Image: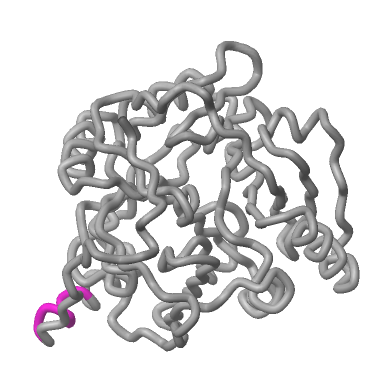
Amino acid sequence: MSIISLGYMGINSKRLGDWEGFATDLLGMQKVDQGGPMRMFRMDDRKQRLIVTGEGEEDLAFMGWEVGSPEDLEALAARLENAGFPVTLHGASLSDQRHVARLISFHDPDGNRLEAFYGPEIASDPFLSGRPISGFKTGSLGMGHAVLHVANVEGILHFYRDILGFNVTDYGLKPYPLYFFHVNGRHHSFAMVGSGRKGIHHFMVELLSLDDVGQGYDIAQQRDEGIAYTLGRHSNDHMMSFYTNTPSKFFVEYGWGAQVVDPETWKPFETHEGPSTWGHERVYLPEDDEVRIRMREMRHKNARDGFRAPDPKPNCAWLDSVVHAE
């Protein structure tokens, strides 16, 4: 596989001031860009991880996927072109803006813009979080994960699995299709929700301390419509998290404690427990919403059946390169 991690994400939004406060005061990122029609934020030693462009519809602008070498980038471009997906090789201007050595872009079957790059720039100064946190789990695991609404699961599944080479971690088919993909030890760096829609559902950042998540939960509760999903634990990646509404009205998952997989030995399987072991009540939906009721019923069944997820294991070789905030 040539893609090794989710390197960065771009969001289209005209609410730059709201995003600035959200990313720093709640999420704990560091703002690194001043003024103009763009905001950039750090999470670690990379020069940027999150970019808010200041234009377009309030939605995903692009996902930036990292490859390990120039040769891997060339091979990926050739594979895409051979499969009928046009590729643009960008020059120094956009590469410099993204703080990478070289960059290509292309689109998935739903029209989402993807970028692939190698050679990310490392900042010379240490990461300074926007609020006191212990740091983000990044390093070889990448920025976190992104989850998209998709109009046609089969078409998107073929693209990400068979052309980009993402590995299916697990999947669920009820009450709607959910597919999770890994490109490194993170349980999933990408996932899709077969909702029949298009656009971003959420992106996730993982913290190094459960208290970071709990304090973020307190902060989010003080914001107008700050909680979209209550605190809960996912049944497949075992992450404890909550979901908060962004200024662009999609979600950010803010979590801790997800399992790390071994890509060399992992075998995909179908899950039947629903997305969450407990919690994650979808408070952004009406109380009588069918999806909200169905998700609650699945969690209650987990409780009746005694379904449990294992506790996080701190000793894992995949975590050796995790970047800690100072």
- Name the foreground residue: 33 vs 15: 33
Whether residue 73 sits left or right of residue 28 in the image: it is right
- What predominant SS class does the magenta segment belong to? helix
Q: Is residue 306 left or right of residue 166?
A: left
Between 28 and 260, the residue placed more toward the observer is: 260
Q: Residue at x 46, y 40 (%)?
A: 249
Residue for point 50% across, 29% down: 41
Res 286 → quadrant: bottom left
**Residue 121 screen position, x and y as percent:** 62, 34
- Where residue 73 sits, quadrant-wise, is bottom right
Q: Position of residue 305 (x, y in %)?
A: 12, 87
Drawn side of residue 47 relative to residue 215, left or right: right
**Vertical position of residue 245 compared to residue 149: above or below:** above
For residue 222, say whether it is visible: yes
Locate residue 43: give its quadrant. top left
Q: Is residue 43 left or right of residue 85?
A: left
> Does residue 242 belong to the magenta stretch?
no
The quadrant of the rendering that contains the N terminus is bottom right
Q: Tell me if residue 303 is in the magenta stretch.
A: yes
Give the magenta part as a residue range.
Answer: 299-304
Quarter of the image that includes the C terminus: top left
- The image's colour scheme reads one colour
Residue at 22% x, 52% y is 230
Q: How many marks?
A: 0
User: Of residues 314 and 93, which is closer to you in this image?
Assistant: 314
Evaluate whether residue 177 shows in this view. no
Query: In the displayed structure, would residue 213 be above or below residue 95?
Result: below
Q: Residue at x 87, y 49 (%)?
A: 88
In front of the other: 253 or 103: 103
Q: Position of residue 55 (x, y in %)?
A: 67, 28
